[in-house]
Image (tube, coloured by chain):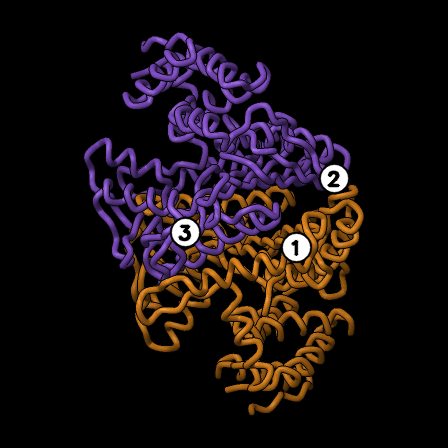
Chain colours: A purple, B orange
Amino acid sequence: MRILSESERTYLEQIFVKLNFSADDAKFLADTLVDADLRGISSHGINRLAWYAQMVKDHTIIPTKQATVIKQRPGLVLVDANQNMGQLAARLAMREIIKKAKQTGIAMAVVRNSNHFGTAGYYTRLALEAGLVGVALTNTRPLVVPTNATTAFLGSNAFAFGFPAQPHPFMFDCATAAVSGGKIQVKDKRGETLPGEWVVDKNRQVVRDPKEAEEILAAAAFSTDQKGGGLLTLGGLFEENSNYKGMGNSLVIEILTGILAQGSISADTVKGKHDFSQFLLVFDPAFFGEPAKLAADATRMLDRIRQLPAIPGKQIWIPGDREYRLLAQNRQRGVEVDEKTYAQMKTLGEELGVTLPGSR
Amino acid sequence: MRILSESERTYLEQIFVKLNFSADDAKFLADTLVDADLRGISSHGINRLAWYAQMVKDHTIIPTKQATVIKQRPGLVLVDANQNMGQLAARLAMREIIKKAKQTGIAMAVVRNSNHFGTAGYYTRLALEAGLVGVALTNTRPLVVPTNATTAFLGSNAFAFGFPAQPHPFMFDCATAAVSGGKIQVKDKRGETLPGEWVVDKNRQVVRDPKEAEEILAAAAFSTDQKGGGLLTLGGLFEENSNYKGMGNSLVIEILTGILAQGSISADTVKGKHDFSQFLLVFDPAFFGEPAKLAADATRMLDRIRQLPAIPGKQIWIPGDREYRLLAQNRQRGVEVDEKTYAQMKTLGEELGVTLPGSR
């Protein structure tokens, strides 16, 4: 079913206020979820609300604690999320590094003691709105099996980067693993088997059944006792296809988040508090060239790629093309909400006295 | 055959001086090549000398022009390589941003109007020596076929990142493509077919014959008339294995090098001058934690990964493990030089009056 994004926004703002977030924080959190749903990134939209609410109830997330700047230098910031939502800490960190980068040209922040922060791309869009170019990284639960290993250890560790272009920015925002867990859920809902090389079992055999894959990932993500198996790195099953490069990408993020934050690496987020860490970086592209010229150059390059000869029947998509197309469509027709999520919204609405948005 | 690295160094320093580089520049250039050979990265060692010498002769590389800082802010530097070797411009850029990062905590540089700069990892090791963490990127000739496309457009675009650890740093240094061209040459020399998903032809069919693959890549890299085919992105042949993420990684580097430098994107380096661009970034990890603690934490994480359960008969390698093992071995036994390269060294030595190092 579909609901209008403005109804979704109103509902979410009210829910977050009832969950003890300030009105301002509730508004921001609602925006991060509505934005994900508008862009078709349902796995990071209202889909997550029941999980967030549960974490508030069990004190994994503490809505009344404010994120704070622990220390800073002209180009560096260390933020403590104080166990509140990752979104709120990342907003603070972005505000601080945007101010700094206006002075020095570049700044980076690390957020410790955090929780899930929504889509990484959201923060690179905040950078773009400020005329800057941004990178956003987060570690996650342990879901990914290193090259030649048989148990999960690495996070699916998100990477996002945005750069100005027309008719929309270049927007690369993805898990560094071969696929995200959300893609497996979609296959499950559609009753399809898993194609390609996505998930392996404890013997490093490719798993085709999405339900088996989901069980493997749930055990890997939420248990201190690793039973084996998990998502593959980008590059897939075999070393000969350089899957160690996918592992390398993931390890760089482990270092820039959990290690630099002096928090938990992905493998240890299964114990006690959530304890994710995030990394944010912005710089001023105007130093290197006139902004309109840089955007025009990027646009020309991306258009040339879109128009390259392609295999028959296939289109060449640039990162961001699909989500900006969905953004335009979903603003009109509303965002997609699956039955399970809508049922969770109904339960939570009744519990907290918030009116459920009607479907279109 | 093998030659002692110190003999290689002496030979290279003399050759570079004869090619009109200053004694200091010759020493640095020699070190970048010896370092690559010691680490077993033969594709970026003395193997490249004949190519560099040819580019000096045809004025693609101009040894007497010095790289200069065009402009700067407290955290940003723009360097013009002035068509000299990329190594020399990258050295200047690294010196500038290391100074800046000591002040502000973080700094980045873009190098324009450059040439090949050797291994990207070399510069991240310069950062480590200065107590900083570094990232180094470069664009390249057009070698890589975007997702669903049938002709090469993207560079194989190198990414390097180093972080302190024991017994050696974490050192991730690789082409963002599925494999580098050097791996194909190795298969050719050994008379083996290409495994996995490395290179496609103009119909996007996987190529098994290394000679056919080398012809495709040579045509893609050095001709303005694209005949089709090239290296695959990380993720391989199929969209279902998320090869668009490999394309995204490569595109981020295109933007941070050619576009930011206002130079050529990889696709346009086939025309006239070489015109590569580089991106360098360093930050001070000590802001986030006591350096020995950060290195110990990284070491602990990497050791846990090395010791994960693995498929029988396979070892789990961390990026950098192989090259530091080879570094220790090759310091003793000398570096490997293939027959073709040794013949080129002989010709060049005779031409310039430099004594050829003997094999061990």
| Foreground pick, B35 / B182 | B35
Q: Say if labels 3 and 1 share a chain.
A: yes
For the point 69% across and 50% down, the residue is B283
Chain that bears disc 1 = B
Give neighbour class at mark 3: few <14, some 14-19, many 20+ (Cα, 10 Å): many
Report the Cα–Cα distance between label 1 and label 2: 18 Å
| Foreground pick, B93 / B99 | B99
**Picture quadrant where residue B274 is located:** bottom right
User: Which label sits on residue B233?
Assistant: 3
For the point 65% across and 45% down, the residue is B261
Residue A172 screen position, x and y as percent:
48, 38
| Foreground pick, B65 / A342 | A342
For the point 47% across and 35% down, the residue is A303
- Amino acid carrying mark 2 in the image: Gln
- Amino acid carrying mark 1 in the image: Val
Q: In the rendered image, is residue A332 in sight?
A: no
Residue A153 screen position, x and y as percent:
42, 53
Report the Cα–Cα distance between label 3 and label 2: 39 Å
